[in-house]
Amino acid sequence: LIPADQHVIFFPNVEAFTGFVSEIRNIHPLLDFISRHPHDDSVIGRYSQQLGLAQDLPKDLVASIALTGSDPALATGSAITILIEPKGNFADKLLARIHDQISLNFVLFHRQVKSGHAHPDGPVPPHDYYLTDDRSVSAYLAIIGGKIVLTNSLQQLALIDRTQVKVRPSLASLDQYR
């Protein structure tokens, strides 16, 4: 599902993903040291708010997680996608739990969020969405290839779908991953 031209980090379980998120919050001094541009120390918080994830994903339903995107400028804002592989045949149950978590997060923070389901024509697959006009909330959810896809970009959702149907090459199709 991961397009060949995107970066990716794989996590074997929820604990590894949660640990990464915790550690990334601590490396901002290093990023500032090696970069010409100072980094916003609330980047992880901004992505968490944008996607609606304030809690850990349900460990009992998640087999693995991949974090991907097309733009390496994560520290300044970028399209980001979380691919979640459910355990067994629990994609629908996992999707429902993620919806509950996102909805609860927005209620707790009194966010005025537009939400719904879209079944558009064209390259974008059917999906659910949570949006605000200022994009402080921008979450698109779909099941593609049996995986839960959570992204802040409709274009990313389309790219993942086109990769799944083999219109675009996948990372797994590259020689170095065979």
Image (cartoon, rainbow, N blue to C red):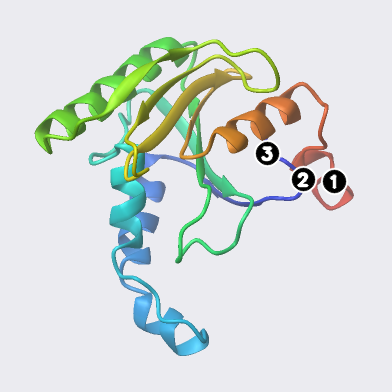
For residue 74, above or below residue 36 = above
| Number of residues whose C-alpha sits closer than 10 Å to that of mark 1, classed few (under 14), some (14–19) or many (20 or more) | few
To which residue does mark 3 refer?
2
To which residue does mark 1 refer?
174
Kindly state the secondary structure of the residue where label 1 is placed: loop
Kindly state the secondary structure of the residue where label 3 is placed: loop
In which quarter of the view is residue 110 placed? top left
The answer to whether mark 1 and mark 2 are in CB contact below 8 A is: yes
The answer to whether mark 3 and mark 1 are in CB contact below 8 A is: no
Q: Position of residue 126 (x, y in %)?
A: 55, 14
Residues 128 and 24: in front is: 128
In the picture, which quadrant includes the N terminus?
top right
Residues 120 and 84: in front is: 120
The residue at the point 36 percent across, 39 percent down is: 51
To which residue does mark 2 refer?
4
Which of labels 1 and 2 is toward the front?
A: 2
Which numbered disc, 1 or 2, marks the residue that appears first in the sequence?
2
Instruction: Give the amino acid at mark 3.
Output: Ile
| Number of residues whose C-alpha sits closer than 10 Å to that of mark 2, classed few (under 14), some (14–19) or many (20 or more) | some
The answer to whether mark 3 and mark 2 are in CB contact below 8 A is: yes
Q: Position of residue 17 (x, y in %)?
A: 40, 48
C-alpha distance separating marks 3 and 2: 6 Å
The residue at the point 27 percent across, 39 percent down is: 56
Tell whether 58 sits left or right of 77.
left
Tell whether 171 sits left or right of 104.
right
Instruction: Give the amino acid at mark 1.
Output: Leu
C-alpha distance separating marks 1 and 2: 7 Å
Q: Position of residue 162 (x, y in %)?
A: 73, 27
